[in-house]
Image (tube, rainbow, N blue to C red):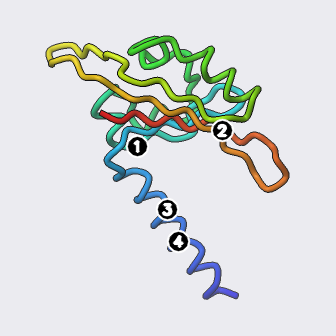
């Protein structure tokens, strides 16, 4: 069994690194409003470092910039459907404004329980 446990740990590491190195900024929020994960692109774009994991999402600047995200997150949690917001302008301090497509997707387990909401920001 030790081999299987080692393989599982290796797969977890691969999954974690794939998420962290994605070219799209991603933040995952738990049903109770905590930051579960944020990747390197989210840190570069919004200043959401990995150390914000476990912190309330509502306290981050990204919650209201580029636009208010609390209501769309609540809609995704309630309806369990993907929500898209396209061509959202995001002005960054000291940098040119960018247009983002934002995808909010429910994360649901095999028992249909809500695990969280994945937010993806494409430039």
* Front disc: 2 or 3: 2
* Sequence order check, earlier mark of 2 and 1: 1
Gap between marks 3 and 4 measured at Cα: 6 Å
Q: Pointer 3: what residue?
A: 15
Q: Please name whichever residue, 17 or 76, is drawn nearer the observer in this view of the structure.
A: 76
Describe the element under mark 4 as helix, strand or loop: helix
Q: Pointer 2: what residue?
A: 106
Crowding around mark 2 (Cα neighbors within 10 Å: few <14, some 14 to 19, many 20+) is many
Gap between marks 2 and 1 measured at Cα: 18 Å
Residue drawn at x 34%, y 34% as measured from the top left: 43
Gap between marks 4 and 1 measured at Cα: 18 Å
* Front disc: 2 or 1: 2
Q: Pointer 1: what residue?
A: 39
Residue drawn at x 58%, y 23% as measured from the top left: 56
At which x and y percent is residue 16?
47, 57
Q: Taking 24 as reference, is 89 above or below it?
A: above
> Residue 65: which quarter of the image?
top left
At which x and y percent is residue 26?
44, 39
Q: Pointer 4: what residue?
A: 11
Q: Taking 114 as reference, is 79 above or below it?
A: above
Do labels 2 and 3 touch, CB within 8 Å? Answer: no
At which x and y percent is residue 89?
32, 16
Describe the element under mark 3 as helix, strand or loop: helix
In this picture, residue 14 sits left or right of residue 74: left
At which x and y percent is residue 110?
79, 56
């Amino acid at each position: 069994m030790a081999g299987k446990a080692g393989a599982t740990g290796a797969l977890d590491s691969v999954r974690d690194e794939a998420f962290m190195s994605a070219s799209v900024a991603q933040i995952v929020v738990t049903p109770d409003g905590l930051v579960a994960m944020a990747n390197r692109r989210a840190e570069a774009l919004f200043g959401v470092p990995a150390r914000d994991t476990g912190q309330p999402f509502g306290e981050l600047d990204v919650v209201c910039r580029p636009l208010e995200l609390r209501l769309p997150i609540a809609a995704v949690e309630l309806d369990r459907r993907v929500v898209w917001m396209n061509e959202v302008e995001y002005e960054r301090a000291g940098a040119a404004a960018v247009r983002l497509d934002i995808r909010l997707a429910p994360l649901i387990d095999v028992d249909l329980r809500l695990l969280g909401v994945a937010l993806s920001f494409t430039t």
